[in-house]
Image (cartoon, rainbow, N blue to C red):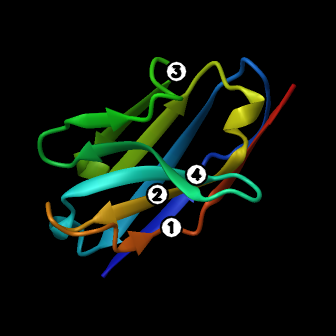
Amino acid sequence: QVQLVESGGGLVQAGGSLRLSCAASGRTFSVYRMGWFRQAPGKGRDVVSSIIWNSGNTYYADSVKGRFTISRDNAKNTVYLQMNSLKPDDTAVYYCAVAPTRSSAYDYWGQGTQVTVSS
């Protein structure tokens, strides 16, 4: 089992920045990929960004490229999402998740943190 705890959400004006954190505990040696997802009201949950734990290879959705940066701190078992130039469309609940192996789905999820961007 892997436990995930997100933090760092909040209310920010358009153009502002926030940094989300996701701390992993438990079987952290079984983490292959960590991802950030978001779900806006009335919409599905979409992937925002992900990072391969060992290699550091990253992925970004087109909607956040150039504005968001994902990073990790191996010693702290923590992944971050730096969000700059925020837009009202970025308003959502943000979740972090873990895929234990290369072929597995995201099996472990955090509780989510609210990000609200005002215009």
CB atoms of marks 3 and 4 within 8 Å: no
- Look at the numbered disc 4 and give the secondary structure of its residue: strand
Residue drawn at (67%, 25%) of the image: 86
Picture coordinates of residue 2, whole percent (x, y): 33, 75
Q: CA distance from mark 2 to mark 4?
A: 9 Å
Q: CA distance from mark 1 to mark 4?
A: 12 Å
State which tag comes first along the sequence, 1 or 4. Answer: 4
Q: Amino acid at mark 4?
A: Arg
Residue denoted by label 2? 96
Using the image, determine if residue 83 lies above or below residue 2. Answer: above
Q: Amino acid at mark 1?
A: Gly
State which tag comes first along the sequence, 1 or 3. Answer: 3
Residue drawn at (60%, 62%) of the image: 112
Q: Is residue 41 left or right of residue 59?
A: right
> Quarter-wise, where is residue 29 in the image?
bottom left
Q: Which-is-in-front pick, marks 2 and 4?
A: 4
Residue denoted by label 4? 38
Q: CA distance from mark 1 to mark 3?
A: 23 Å
Q: Is residue 84 left or right of residue 41?
A: left
Picture coordinates of residue 97, whole percent (x, y): 40, 62
Q: CA distance from mark 3 to mark 4?
A: 15 Å
Residue denoted by label 1? 110
Residue denoted by label 3? 67
State which tag comes first along the sequence, 3 or 4. Answer: 4
Q: Amino acid at mark 3?
A: Arg
Outermost residue, front side? 43
